[in-house]
Image (cartoon, rainbow, N blue to C red):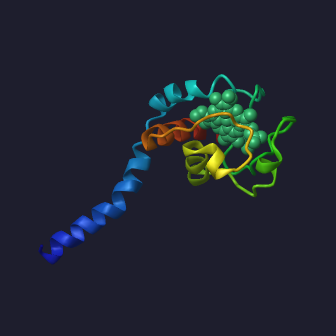
Amino acid sequence: MKLSTLCGVILFAILFPLMSVHAADIKVGENVFRKCMACHVVTKEQHRTGPHLVGLFGRAAGTANGYKRYSKAIKTSGIIWDAISLDAYLAAPKKYIKGTRMAFAGLKKKADRDNVIAYLQQFSQ
Ligand code: HEC
């Protein structure tokens, strides 16, 4: 393989994941969020089984005002919510935070996670 081709391939490998984050689709994410709606509200600050998700980005895990049912595990996790920590939590909640009370198996598809994270981010501005 020519060096220039190799460089191109490497550059693509680096840039592609970044591009795919930008390609996240808020509308599709809204559909993915249906899986969360049994337990979460994001359009207003209302708790259900789970805490509301308004203003999530940049917030420390386990600190939504007025939600009393957080597990000790999430409160002491030291996690700040951003696209990276959310991706890890939503992929496998009980693996990322051992002892979390969120009874949700996880979103196996990276695209589902990217899209739902893009959807959630709108309510953090
Ligand atoms: C069966 C109910 C249930 C479902 C479904 C569910 N969650 Fe949760 N979620 C919870 C509970 C309960 C907690 C609190 C966890 C704890 O205290 O350990 C939580 C916590 C969270 C947190 C941390 C909030 C904070 O204030 O730190 C995020 C983010 C979250 N869920 C996102 C989601 C998303 C996105 C989905 C859908 C893909 C989802 N959850 C599906 C019940 C659920």
Look at the picture and state if 64 lies above or below 39: below
Res 106 → quadrant? top right
Is 115 displayed left or right of 79 in the figure?
A: left
In the image, what residue occupies the spot 23% across and 72% down? 7
Q: Residue at point 31% right, 62% down?
A: 13
Ligand 1 is located in which of the four quadrants?
top right
For residue 74, above or below residue 52 = below
Q: Position of residue 70 (x, y in %)?
A: 81, 40
Q: Residue at x 83, y 48 (%)?
A: 72
At x 55% / y 41%, what residue is drawn? 117
Look at the image and tell me in which quarter the N terminus lies. bottom left
Counting from the top left corner in percent of width and height, residue 80 is at 70, 54
Image-based side of 67 in relation to 12, left or right: right
Percent from the top left, x then y, of residue 84? 56, 54
**Quarter in which the C terminus is drawn:** top right
Residue closer to the observer: 18 or 48: 48
Q: Residue 98 placed where, x, y %? A: 70, 50
Q: Residue furthest left?
A: 2
